[in-house]
Amino acid sequence: PREKNWFSIALMTTLGWLSLFIMWPLAQSAGVAAVAWFAAGGILYTVGMVMLVTNRPRLWPRVFSYHEVFHVLVVAASAMHFAAIWRYVVPLAA
């Protein structure tokens, strides 16, 4: 297996949890549900990173394995962050 790019892994994990810095003001203005959506996205990013680092699970090797699951989780996490912004943050700007 290829050597891990720890800088990329640290950067992606940091970006996944960057919303931590806005959690308190977000909870005050948009509510706890908005925070829950952002936190759930961060959890999905983190689970994906753990899979990428550990090379697990190996579901169907060479077909659908940890790397593909990682990408599915990243897309799901991004969708959760987008949905949270669309549902809870955009209406505050109107």
Image (cartoon, grey):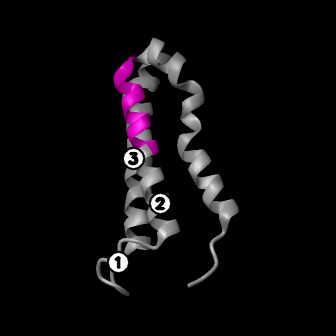
- What whole-number distance in Å separates the C-alpha atoms at marks 1 and 2? 13 Å
Q: How many marks?
A: 3
Which contiguous range is marked in magenta? Answer: 31-42
- Badge 2 amino acid: Val
Looking at the image, which residue sits at the far top? 28
Say whether disc 1 or disc 2 marks the residue closer to the N-terminus: 2
- Badge 3 amino acid: Ala
Q: Is residue 42 left or right of residue 40?
A: right
Residue 68 visible in the picture: yes
- Secondary structure at numbered mark 3: helix
Neighbourhood count class around disc 1 (C-alpha, 10 Å): few under 14, some 14–19, many 20 upward: some
- Secondary structure at numbered mark 1: loop
Labels 1, 3: front one = 1
Q: Quadrant of the N terminus?
A: bottom right
Rendered position, 8 above or below 26: below
Rendered residue at 37%/34% (across/down): 37
* Residue at numbered disc 3: 79
Rendered position, 43 above or below 87: below
- What whole-number distance in Å separates the C-alpha atoms at marks 1 and 3? 25 Å
Looking at the image, which residue sits at the far right? 7
Please tell me in which quadrant of the rendered image residue 82 appears.
top left
Q: Tell me residue 8's x, y (percent).
A: 65, 61
Q: Is residue 1 left or right of residue 80?
A: right
* Residue at numbered disc 2: 50
* Residue at numbered disc 1: 58
Say whether disc 2 or disc 3 marks the residue closer to the N-terminus: 2
**Pointer 2 with pointer 3, Cβ within 8 A:** no
Rendered position, 60 above or below 93: below
- Badge 1 amino acid: Arg
- Secondary structure at numbered mark 2: helix
Rendered position, 48 above or below 20: below
